[in-house]
Image: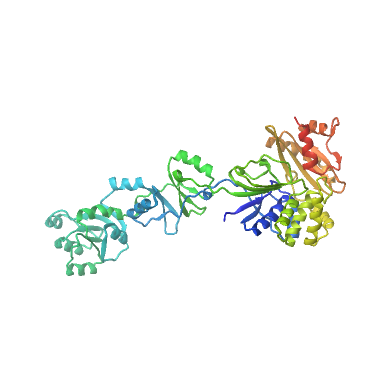
Amino acid sequence: MDKIYIFGHQNPDTDAVTSAIALSYLKNKQGLNTEPRVLGHISNETKYVLDYFNEPVPKYLNNVKLQLKDVDYHKGLYINERESIKNVYDTLHNQSVTGIPIVADDNKYRGIVTIQDITRELIIGNFEKLNAYYDNILDAINGETILKFDDEISGDILVAAYKSTTIIENIKFTNDSILIVGDRDSIIEKAVNSKVKLIIITGNSNIKDEHLSIAKKNKINIIRTGKDTFHTSKLICLSNSISTIMKVDKSKVFHENDYYDDFIELSKKLKHNNYPILDNKGYCLGLIRITEIVKKNNKKVMLVDHQEKSQSVFGLDEAQILEIVDHHKIGNINTSAPINFRNMTVGSSNTIVYCMYEEASVEIPKNIAGLMLSGILSDTLCLKSPTTTSMDVDAVVKLSIIAGVDYEKFAFNMFKAASSLDELTKEEIIKNDFKVFPYDDKKFAVAQVITVDVDNMLNEYKEYLDKLENIKDKEGYEFVILVVTDILKNGSYLLFTESAKRILESVYDIDNIRQKYYVDRLVSRKKQIIPAILDNIG
């Protein structure tokens, strides 16, 4: 069963992380194979929650782009460098392919051979040399073993085509000679006394016992075949090891984690059809052929707490979205097929996930209840946010009982952990909860920091302004706003780039708005800030 990744938005907050974990648990109980992931570093608040309920941080998901491992290629199609040219040709024919990777004994990639390479070898190859294995010679000429002393056979091929006297008087045999001969006793006698490497006796001819005895003493390999000398001399070249003709060219090699679109682009330049696929350690996995790419197993995903492409994982267009669970406005994500879509006007994605547990009659474990509770408390600011609904309140009450916590005390400690900005740079603080919003062909960003102690941030506001301007220019935003929410006062201070000044003056109907502008009861980016900006932009 294919794995399904479940994740929230970039710069994940507590609601995004915990709803991904909770939804994954539910889906797995329903028979799916899912895994929660995160798209970025988690906040101090989220870390506090995960530690409190003994839940590991989900793995990081870099992207969901289509990779070669997601394509149906010829997995396991490769052949050992010891195999003969004949065996490789038979494999190519049986598999209906025109190329095959060659591997060493440990399956490390060595090279590639195509049908063109074999054809070229049969036409213009070196027919005087043999580099083969004894058993492959047997197979190529349909021979039988008479004597065998060596697995590997290398040497110069001699065919006894002249008169016996001519061969005996003029041809020199050495211990590297490979003799192909019929029923010519005098030539066989010279060969065994010369300690040749191999004698191939054709036509099912017999060998004298005395010659056989000398051959044993001199450790000479002997093979007999029913084929005649002409056909034997033609076929023996097919027993050569495939390593003798393979191409060692790693420019045409790809790895299973390479991206499919990169592969297609490079293959257009290389102009080949057959490409070996390796793992990251150089072991061969199989062969991919351009002309046979049909089925692509796009990664399967479920989204929680977002539905804006700009807030989601890189490569989302190449993934198959199966489900979305969210409580924000309808975004710009398109799907190629119908999906399960849950979008509700509640304060937290976890409230929707809680409803899904109720509908499915799935029991909620203590730790999962605690995670879901944390997500709702975080997004609704302990039920004080204007986004809070009666469904959120009901879920908090029931989940806190299952989790065994006093939700108000827990929320205070959670927010206190979130307000700790120690060891974070100014940019990390800004980017911790940073969301991008498109409009027309432009985009703006709103970051939010929720804390119980805003004094330190406001004292250093000029440094934050410099960072906001740098982020705006570097990443191409029309403007960037940082909302510093004081959880105790139940309001927020605004820091913003100069380009946001006109928009905010329009939103709050004031002239010459200044930095650190305080708005009482302003706590919800989703419900109070973004809609107001979109109504006044342009």
Residue 433 image position (x, y, % from top left): 74, 45
Residue at 14%, 62% in the rendered image: 186
User: Could one spot residue 530 in this view of the protein?
Assistant: yes
Q: Looking at the image, what colour scheme do you see?
A: rainbow
Residue 317 image position (x, y, % from top left): 60, 42
Residue 340 image position (x, y, % from top left): 66, 48
Q: Is residue 186 above or below residue 415?
A: below
Give the number of callouts: 0
Is 129 positioned to the left or the right of 4 in the image? left
Q: Is residue 259 above or below residue 228?
A: above
On the rendered image, what quadrant is the N terminus found in? Answer: bottom right
Q: Nearer the viewer, residue 11 or 303?
A: 303
On the rendered image, what quadrant is the C terminus found in? Answer: top right
Q: Is residue 428 above or below residue 536?
A: below
Is 138 positioned to the left or the right of 441 in the image? left
Residue 446 image position (x, y, % from top left): 75, 40
Q: Nearer the viewer, residue 298 or 267?
A: 298
Q: Nearer the viewer, residue 250 or 171?
A: 250
Q: Nearer the viewer, residue 99 or 156?
A: 99
User: Could one spot residue 497 in this view of the protein?
Assistant: no
Is 88 positioned to the left or the right of 325 in the image? left
Residue at 29%, 59% in the rendered image: 137
Quarter of the image where one finds residue 406:
bottom right
